Amino acid sequence: LSRAIAISPFVPTASGTLAAPTHLYDPRIPELVALLDRNTSFPAAPFDDDATLGILASLGMRSTVTQTAVLDAAMTAERLGDVAGDAYDFAAANERGWAILRYLETPDGTRMLAPDPVKDVKSFFGSMFGKEDEKDGGKKEGAELPREAFVAQLSSVAWVPVATEPPESEPGLPWPKNPSPVAAPNYARPPNDAWLCSATMRVLAREPQSSALADILGWRRGVPAATLSSQLLALGEAHPSIEDPAVGRALAAAVPRVYALLTTSLNSRDFADALARLPGEARVVWVGTGFARAESVAFSGALDLKPYLHVLPADLTCFRPLLTAMGVRDTFAAGDYVRLLRGLAKDAGGGGLDGSRLDLALWVLGTLADTPPATLRAVLVDEDDAGGLGGSSLPVPDASGSLVPASEVRFNDAPWLAAPEGVRLSHPKLPSQTAEAVGVRSLRLALLAEASEDIDVQLHGSAEAFGQHEALTTRLKHILDAYADGPGVISELVQNADDAGAAEVRLLLDQTPGGDKSLLGPKMARWQGPALVAWNDAVFSPADFHNIARIGQDSKIDRPAAAGRFGLGFNAVYHFTDLPSFVSGDYLVMFDPHATHLPGATPARPGLKIAFGASPLLSQFPDQFAGYLDTFGCDLTASYPATMFRFPLRTDEAARASEIKPEAYTPAQVRALFEQFRERATQTLLFLKNVRKIGVYERGGDSRAPKLVYEVSIPAFQDDKDPRAATLQWVAGNSAFSRGVAPVAAVKKQQFVEKLRTMPEKSLPTSVGWMDVQMRATETAESLGEDDDDAKVIVGISIRRERWLICSSLAGGKARALALSDTGVSRGLVPWVGIAARVPHPDDGESFIGHCDGRAFCFLPLPVRTGLPVHVNAYFELSSNRRDIWFGGDMAGGGAARSEWNQALLTKVCAPCYARLIVTVATMLGPTPAFYALFPDVNVPEPWGGVVRELYATLAFEGSKVLHTPADNGGWIALTDAVYPDHELAHDDALRDALVAEGMRLTDAPTTVLERIEEHAVPNPERVSPERVRRMLRESRLERSDRPRDRVLVLLRYVMSDVIDDD
């Protein structure tokens, strides 16, 4: 009877329906009230008082949160959150979803979902064989589903609260329209994954509070490749170009995450399926300013060809395998440039091109001009002329800037003559050589044929179009954004001189006024003021002329002894100027990236290269070239056996017109730059390969003679042998030392690789020795009554000398293996390191301070402080602006390889090199504070902490005798042989002296050094203790009478200290 009553629908609910007690829930349970529908799940009056509720509970009313209760609540939330349903109630659905989530995040709720093998087996077999649990055609109330089935049902019902609006902190995030406030867990992800899935999945309203729940519902599993590819597709559709900088920053951070996760599934079936579902025209490649189709993106090439072609940002090249699979190519082909031109013409619709698009067209034509004629003809035949511009003819700009077929125009190679009526001329910025190569015919030839005369109008046969092929002003502006102004710019110039084999570098602030009459062009007058001059005693090779005309060509990779050599870093000189120039050997070269100052300069060839020995230009334009004369021996009449750069400083007038940097650069700023460089000048020479002297000068007023400001040099080496030479000679080749320098072309990459591969590890060079660095400076005083900085008189010369111990090494082991790997060979890696430690110079006397503030070097100092008491030099993989080394455990692809290389250098090469230096300096300095100051006595941040750990481990493993003991008249002992003092000894000199007198090998190294040794190398050292001293005394051969009474008393007090209470 009770059972019949229990299942009979006689209890009213708030909705007006009647329900059986077994189908209702006890409203006295707060969790149930929060979870379930109040209208249908609980008894209503008059059945809602405590007495009646007690009777209903005895009839089977549910009083606990069961699977059924949770599923009922979830389905209610789904019904209320159905935007298209009649019962849609945003607030109620949201409230119900939060109630379910809060409950499931409690321990009770999580246990309901967590695996319980015993319960699951019982539930499974009960569902199969438990017929006695079924009565009246239904299942026994409270029977549970197998856990997997319950989780599967719960995961497929839309109940979990999700965000309905994109977060304001994530601009540009794809988002569904009119979304429901709840979603099925299977189709939701935590907010941290929003950028990975928001296009096709819902984003939880907050991060899960229970990691166990997140695991059970799959919120911590990897995002499927299909979801990631759909997200990329949505991002590309929404952001073909970026107008809002905040959106750009958000995407720049988010896209690498998507790429990184897709890379992990690169070779899987899921990835192949996801890639196949992407439309052919999908914009899925991030190019920094928006998304582009893969076919319009390449890993390398010219910049600023948007919106037609894009070069992948450098920070995404680590995803090369993924992007290659998506269709990104290494470089653009001639067909891409032809399509670009025709697209440009179609977009222009017959009208003239604006300045930027005209420059773009000219650059593309210049590039196509370098294509072999047969290849270009084949491309033109194959390409469809969608713009209707004449079949196999390229579009070129005419004099008005309109793109027309090349067959309809002539290039003007006779500008002193008027063109015949009806002849359409090509644009004056299109060089004749380029025009001819892309199919434009010569006006001069037509005029000559018509006039039947031979008119020679060549540029005196000695000047030719020359310049940085890629030197667009916007590209240079981007470079300056990466390369900060400061002494690092001078370092770049010194580095290039060092790679060229120069022994001396000079820097000059030239303030002598220049004439403004006989100039190459009227706009050159604004560049006739003060200039920064950089001189070195090496001469440009043909390869140098080639390299300096190309921005960012990594030419050093093929020369293992080179570190810079006119890569991106040289272009940092555009901080000073828009018109750099130099003279070297037989040539004078001038650059004009704007193509607005020099005659004949174009965006494709922005500069001049003049063979000055045979050129009348120097006599025709004396004001233009006066700045070179009488400067460091230059007269421009004979071949110049050196190289001198001249950087005229950007004036206020020039800055207003500059597209590179709209800021003036004053003589005061150059002086400040010189002073900044003075602080690091002595250290600059530590690891250079050839440069031995750097001088800084000023010149002004009527005097043509430069005046010394300061000069750093290397006056002496230990035993007259450069400790760095052996390694350099090995890397650069013996032939490099025929005149005492090592130019970068001495050994090519492949020769070096073979030499490194075949050389026994024990034969790789390493050397230790000191060298002196001298600073010689002019001391000045302001003239009486004068405040002008230029009004100074010389009062003397100051000389300061420093001594540095250098250890230079070429290593084997893991570093050599990485250098010889395919990646290492392609990157030109060299396992070359050096350590420099400041040691006392005879001139120092008592003034010597000790260790230096350690910096990282890549032959020149980097703006990276290591925390070590020495300088560390290595052939590091650097960021493109040379301001930091690659390091991190969260990188992939190329970034991970660079980080692995740097860590191998630090731990497997630098640390052993550091250890050799300490062994050497021990005998040089003895157990002095200066010696122990060279030990790292604190833990330093990564990656430099690896050097500390490996240093102490190496000293211990090799048994290096670098700890001093005063026992037995003093001597050096290994880390593992020393007896380490306890804390009592630090305050008891008498006890320490007594133990030493007994012969105990007690080290007198500083406590901080011993702590680091114990932490990293000798975890359980032999330490002084009463028991240890008792044992020593028992084993001693000394008679009691041989010991002084005071010593006996001190020893007795100590050995009894652990067995007798002092009180």
Image: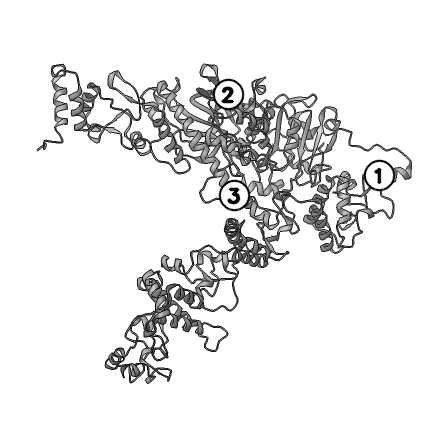
Residue 870 position, x and y percent, is 40, 28
State the mark number for residue 660.
Answer: none
> Is residue 394 among what the camera can see?
no
Viewer-proximal residue among 700 and 453 = 453
Say if mark 2 contacts mark 1, CB within 8 Å: no
Crowdedness near tag 1: few (<14), some (14–19) or many (≥20) residues, C-alpha within 10 Å: some
> In percent of the image, x 74 and y 31: which residue is there?
463
Given this view, does label 1 or label 3 mark the residue nearer the observer? 3
Crowdedness near tag 3: few (<14), some (14–19) or many (≥20) residues, C-alpha within 10 Å: some
Q: How is the image coloured?
A: one colour
Q: What's the amino acid at mark 1?
A: Arg
> Is residue 597 among what the camera can see?
yes
> In percent of the image, x 12 and y 28: which residue is there?
1056
Residue 311 position, x and y percent, is 61, 46
Q: Say which label, 1 or 3, has the lower sequence index.
A: 1
Residue indicated by mark 3: 893
Viewer-proximal residue among 668 and 962 = 962
Q: What's the amino acid at mark 2?
A: Ala
Q: Secondary structure at mark 3?
A: loop
Q: Label 2 vs label 1: CA separation?
A: 59 Å
Q: Secondary structure at mark 1?
A: helix
Q: Is residue 135 above or below residue 294?
A: below
Viewer-proximal residue among 725 and 96 = 96
Q: Is residue 360 above or below residue 598?
A: below
Q: Is residue 742 above or below residue 488?
A: above
Q: What's the amino acid at mark 3?
A: Gly
Q: Label 2 vs label 3: CA separation?
A: 35 Å
Residue 881 position, x and y percent, is 53, 38
Q: Say which label, 2 or 3, has the lower sequence index.
A: 2
Residue 1059 position, x and y percent, is 11, 31
Residue indicated by mark 1: 444
Dividing the picture into quadrants, the one containing residue 20 is bottom left
